Structures are given as structure tokens and as C-alpha cells.
Image (cartoon, helix red, strand yellow):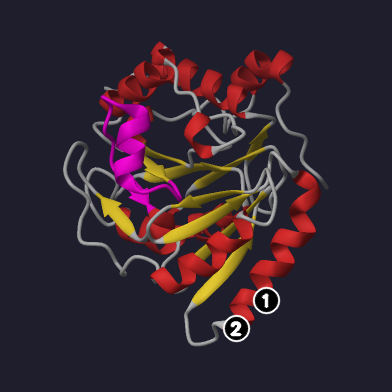
Amino acid sequence: MRRACVHPARLSDKVMSNPILSLPAALNQFAILLDVDGTILDLAPTPREVFVSHALRDTLARLSERTQGAVAFVSGRPVSELDLIFAPLQLPAIGGHGAELRIVAGAAAGAPRLAPLDSRVKQRFAAIAEAGPGIVLEDKGYSLALHYRLAPDKETLVRAAAAEICSDLKDTSIELLPGKLVLEVKQTGVTKAIAVRELMTYPPFATRRPIFLGDDVTDLGVFEILPDFNGIGISVGRDVPGIAACFDRPADVRRWLEQISRNDAFATP
């Protein structure tokens, strides 16, 4: 049976009555893992236009304090870019779809798990962005993203051109991941799920139950591994097999995070 997402007008009631959304156990039993774009931040016409409010920074800082540091970003963006858009807040983070991992808040990311994407590959995909107005190339270092939110009619063109490039570059280990008006181009061998498995071996994440929130195709692998950690999956904007709950949109996620960051019922002992 399809699960209905939580509607904004009914969010308070849902949080109070849903045993998953209300976190019946103490908050210090959980680790909170957050995809960024489309999950806690509203999607923007271009990646540089995302908006991070002071309220969200404060919410994340409170959650980090109350979980003894067990709040982490799980993003396709590089860790350095996450630090920029959430500044001055620096949380543990998985960046580059798993290419980078920072265990300790404020520390440098560890050695990357692979080299940056080959310049030859970048040049080929950059040509797609020149095929017409509204196609935006985002260079994430270890991956690329072709955004066509400003030109949704270019979806067929973008996907066909990208598939042709992949066919031409068979000697490179790259894969295509379609998202919400975006096509991700990433290297094989690293994923968010692999990096989450590693993150969960380090304190303060080890021994905790992960709660992962995500919205897109690149998040599906993380949802799939959550049962291995007795974890909880919450999707945004779409129903996903095996998840415990679903929010309609990032604004609802931000409101829920703010509630659990303040609710005395979840205070740590």
C-alpha cells in the first residue's frame, strides 16, 4: 500500500502521533544523517542559489549538541562547499556522493577515496551545457551534475547526449544517475551507502540507530542498507520501499528537525 507523505497542515498532529516521527526513545540513541539539496534545502534554479536560513543553522547546531555530535550531511556536494553554504557551521559530512568523509565536526575531510573526475570527461559533458540556454553544469570535483531546471524541455537532449558520451568513453568508470531535473555523472566504486557504512563504525555514530532523510535516486542505496543498522528511513517528496515515513517537502523536514531539537521529551539523560 502506498504511504502518504506528511502534509504541512497536519505535521504537528503527525509528529505527535507517529511513533517514528516523534522519536519515542531518547534522542541520544540516534544518529541523524541528512541529504542536503531537496531534503533540508529547497531546490533552487541553480546550485549556487540555495538558501540556508539562520534558523536552520541554529536547529542543526542544537541537534548536534543534543546528539553529542551524531548529525552528519550526506551529499553529492564536496565537503568544502557544504562548509561554505552552512558557514560557520561545520558538521561531520559525506561529500561527493561518498568520495569524501569527515568524521569530526570542523576537521578536514579525510583523504578522498578516488581522484577527481578526469578532465577529458568533464570537457565532453561541459559541451552539453552549451547546447542551449537553461542547461547548467555543476562541477563537484569527483562528479558532475547537468541541471536543466531552467529548461525542462531539454531533458531528452541532456539524457541522450550524456548516454552517447558514456558509450564513447567505455574506458572510464562513470555512471549516470537521473534526478529531479538533473542528471548526475559520477564515478563508479564510491556511493553514499558505502560511505555511510564507514561513518557508522566511528563514534559518536557507532552503536546508534541512524535516521536517514533523502529525496532522490542517489539516496536509494542508503535507504536499502538501513536495516543493517536497525535504522529508520524518511523520504522527502516521494514514497520509497521500506521507509518508515515521508515528508512532502523540505520545509516540513526543517520544521520537524526544529521540533525535535527543542522538544524536552527527547532531552538526553
Quick check: marks 2 and 1 in contact, CB under 8 Å? Answer: yes
Residue placed under numbered mark 1 in the picture: 164
The residue wearing badge 2 is 168
Is any part of residue 187 visible from this angle? no
Q: Considering the numbered disc 2 on the image, is that residue within a helix, a strand or a loop?
A: helix
Residue 54 placement, left or right of 151:
left
Q: Residue at x 52, y 44 (%)?
A: 232
Where is residue 184 shown, x and y percent of the image? 57, 58
Res 196 quadrant in image: bottom left
Q: Judge left or right: residue 70 versus residue 59.
A: left
The residue located at (35%, 16%) in the rendering is 58
Quadrant placement of the C terminus: top left
Check if residue 85 falls in the magenta segment.
yes
Q: CA distance from mark 2 to mark 1?
A: 6 Å
Residues rendered magenta in the picture: 75-95
Let me know if residue 166 appears in the view.
Answer: yes
**Mark 1 neighbour class, 10 Å CA radius: few under 14, some 14 to 19, many 20 or more:** few
- Compared with 204, 177 (above or below) is below
**Residue drawn at point x = 51 percent, y = 38 percent:** 47
User: Which element carries disc 1, helix, strand or loop?
Assistant: helix
Vertical position of residue 54 compared to residue 115: above or below? above
Amino acid at dot 1 = Glu
Magenta stretch contains residue 204: no
Between 118 and 235, the residue placed more toward the observer is: 118
Q: Is residue 127 left or right of residue 231?
A: right
| Residue type at the position of mark 2 | Asp
How many numbered circles does the render carry? 2
| Residue 15 % position (x, y) | 60, 21
Residue 192 image offset from top left, x and y in percent = 44, 58
